[in-house]
Amino acid sequence: MNASAIDRLPVVVIGAGPIGLAAAAHLVERGLDPLVLEAGPTAGSAVREWSHVRLFSTWAELVDPAAEKLLAPTGWVRPDAAVYPTGGDWAERYLQPLADVLGDTVRYGVRVTGVARAGRDRIVDSGRDEQPFTVHIETSDGREERLTARAVIDASGTWSTPSPMGADGLAALGEKAAADRVSYRVPDVDDPAVRARYAGRRTAVIGSGASAFTALALLAELAAEAPGTHAVWVLRRGIGATTYGGGEADQLPHAEPWACAPRRPSRPVTRARSPDSAPGPSPMTATDWSSSPTTAAARTPSTRSSSSPASAPTSPSSPSSASASTNASRPRRPSPR
Ligand SMILES: Cc1cc2nc3c(=O)[nH]c(=O)nc-3n(C[C@H](O)[C@H](O)[C@H](O)COP(=O)(O)OP(=O)(O)OC[C@H]3O[C@@H](n4cnc5c(N)ncnc54)[C@H](O)[C@@H]3O)c2cc1C
């Protein structure tokens, strides 16, 4: 295929999540033809799986400028920039309208199963860069198709491949064997089945990302209502100045001050061995956040308020810092799970 024929092919974007849809909007802005292939039935299918979680970013940080230009003529109204939406709000008020305005360029129920250079198998390497891409897809009704593309943008995200617990980025010893007791998502404690799983039980929350903070805050709320609920926070590193991120290390634009920033807990921590028994410099640290339901509730900022992001449990012994709003204590962008 010659170069001008390749240039007439679409740019395939894998995934109609926030990144894939923003990429499509930028392609349109540059006069290129996107073709967005989404495995799920709607835009933001992965984001909708955590609809109940309030983001730590405001709308000001969640709407792409090129996307807004496409949406404006439809009468779309930008949500209040200072509000922290839930995942459900993000999908329904922005991602789906954006996908709708992109129209037929977004196909749903189409899973990309492979991408390669057309006509170049694993052995043949000559002239690869002169060939278009071939994209293998499987539709939700089981059909297979092959598409040809001038370029491919992989925006398939990481939701279906959560980070394992091991310090080396692989599963910890015993993690697979305990699979039926491990969840890689923030629990929706308003769902009766999920609530029953955690109420009155001891749960280890592993990690120092924003999702761990949110899970701890939700479990502390649950502890206030369901006696016997305990959360143990397990960290690879001890709690220190960088646990909550922010400051110089924060790459997010500082659009506006934070209404409710997480604070350092003042409770002492107890040291425990890593679950995969790794000796040496990075033992896990466990902090028990259960205590009495009253103190758990006192430490917990509202995870339901749209004017404050979900954040870490806070210590009742430092009430003066409750409304702290400095860059140094801003949460960092999470590794979501
Ligand atoms: C609980 C939680 C809270 C978060 N809070 C924030 C926050 O406050 N601020 C922030 O900036 N970020 C936040 N994030 C992170 C943010 O959601 C992600 O960075 C963002 O969703 C990534 O967008 P994406 O489009 O790359 O991937 P995704 O949102 O995962 O979308 C990928 C899409 O690709 C589709 N797909 C996957 N594989 C295929 C395939 N093979 N073929 C076709 N389609 C496929 C999926 O169905 C999905 O729709 C949070 C994440 C979580 C989990």
Image: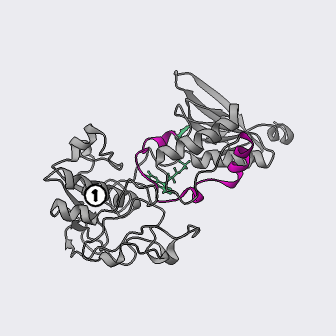
What residue do we see at 56% from left, 55% from top?
59
Q: Is residue 196 above or below residue 310?
A: above
Observer-nearest of 81 and 25: 81
Q: Locate the C terminus by quadrant.
A: bottom left
Callout count: 1
Residue 53 image point, x, y percent: 41, 50
Q: Is residue 43 above or below residue 264?
A: above
Viewer can see residue 53? yes
> Which residue shows up at 63% across the image and 50% down it?
78
Residue 193, percent across and down?
A: 26, 37
Work out which quarter of the rendered image holds the N terminus and state it: top right
**Mark 1 residue CB less than 8 A from any atom of ligand 1:** no
**Mark 1 secondary-structure assignment:** strand
The residue most toward the left is 228
Residue 48 drawn in magenta: yes
Residue toward you, 278 or 190: 190
Q: Is residue 249 above or below residue 122?
A: below
Disc 1 residue type (three-letter)? Val
Q: Which residues are magenta?
A: 45-74
In which quadrant of the rendered view does residue 233 lie?
bottom left
* Image spot of residue 42 (x, y percent): 54, 34
Q: Position of residue 11 (x, y in %)?
A: 72, 41
Residue 177 visible in the shown view = no
Camera-side residue: 28 or 114? 28
Residue 243 part of the magenta-drawn span:
no
What residue is pinned by disc 1? 205
Instruction: Say few, some or many: other residues with alpha carbon within 10 Å of mark 1 (under 14 / 14 to 19 / 20 or more).
Output: many
What's the image's color scheme?
A: one colour
